[in-house]
Amino acid sequence: MRSLVILASLAACGDNTLPPLRYTDPGAGKLRLIQGPSVGQGPQTSVVLELVVGDAPLTGYSVGFDLPLDDTQVALGPFTAGTALAPGTAPVAALGTLSGTGPLAHQLVTAQSQKASGGGAVATNATLAPGTVLYAVQLDLRTGATGGVVFDGTAPDFVLRSGGMRDRAGTTVVSAADVAIGTLVATP
């Protein structure tokens, strides 16, 4: 929905070029990966994606996902931990990574948890209101990217193999099937 607003804004300005990275927000989900604030001005060579709580409140302790993507098109930018699930103080219990090798190669792996012990530890689950931003991750267009679909969470054959939310006891609160992912396209 937000990408339609961005495209409409460009058309209203008389600029018919599409931004190099276009994200289309997903439909309903208990957790959703949506587009966050723009990075800089002009054609967007970076996109910020936020993992947010869907339309119903949730109670949990940790959250994350492993998203397969075309890492020849994008590189990982900054990962920003949210405050709704308190990740504690250094080292924080939050991370985003994109590896080219190993069992999680070519996957954006993100996770955040309330810290179990040490500085800023929280021993209880958090109650999260609808729309709460859990964390944000930036993806940057790679130099020399040829363009194409980076990932499409709306494709009929798309499966998020790992993701969701768990409570302090480790019980699944949101399964991977209930994490809504949109579509990111690179158009260099």
Image (cartoon, helix red, strand yellow):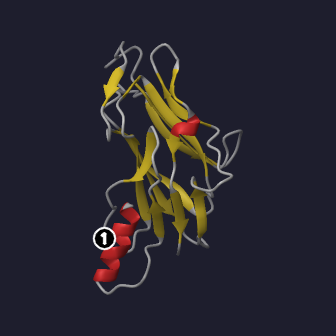
Q: x, y percentage for residue 73? A: 58, 64
Q: Does residue 183 appear to the left or right of 120 in the view shown?
A: right
Task: Name the amino acid, label 1.
Answer: Gln
Give the residue displayed 37% in from the left and 15% down from the top: 118
Q: Is residue 168 above or below residue 147?
A: above
Q: Does residue 21 appear to the left or right of 134 in the view shown?
A: right
Q: Is residue 73 above or below residue 78?
A: below
Give the residue displayed 37% in from the left and 18% down from the top: 125
Q: Does residue 46 appear to the left or right of 9 in the view shown?
A: right
Give the SS element for disc 1.
loop
Q: Residues within 10 Å of mark 1 (few under 14, many from 20)?
A: few
Question: In front here: 153 or 20?
Answer: 153
> From where the camera sits, is residue 34 visible?
yes
Q: x, y percentage for residue 35? A: 39, 55
Q: Quadrant of the N terminus?
A: bottom left
Residue furthest to the bottom in view is 14
Q: Is residue 63 above or below residue 154?
A: above
Q: Which residue is mark 1?
A: 41
Give the residue displayed 49% in from the left and 13% down from the top: 169
> From where the camera sits, is residue 142 visible?
no
Q: x, y percentage for residue 86? A: 33, 26
How many marks the image carries: the answer is: 1
Q: Quadrant of residue 89?
A: top left
Question: In front here: 10 or 58?
Answer: 58
Q: Is residue 139 above or below residue 53?
A: below
Q: x, y percentage for residue 44? A: 40, 69
Question: In front here: 110 or 24?
Answer: 24
Q: Does residue 113 appear to the left or right of 102 in the view shown?
A: left
Give the residue displayed 63% in from the left and 62% down from the top: 72
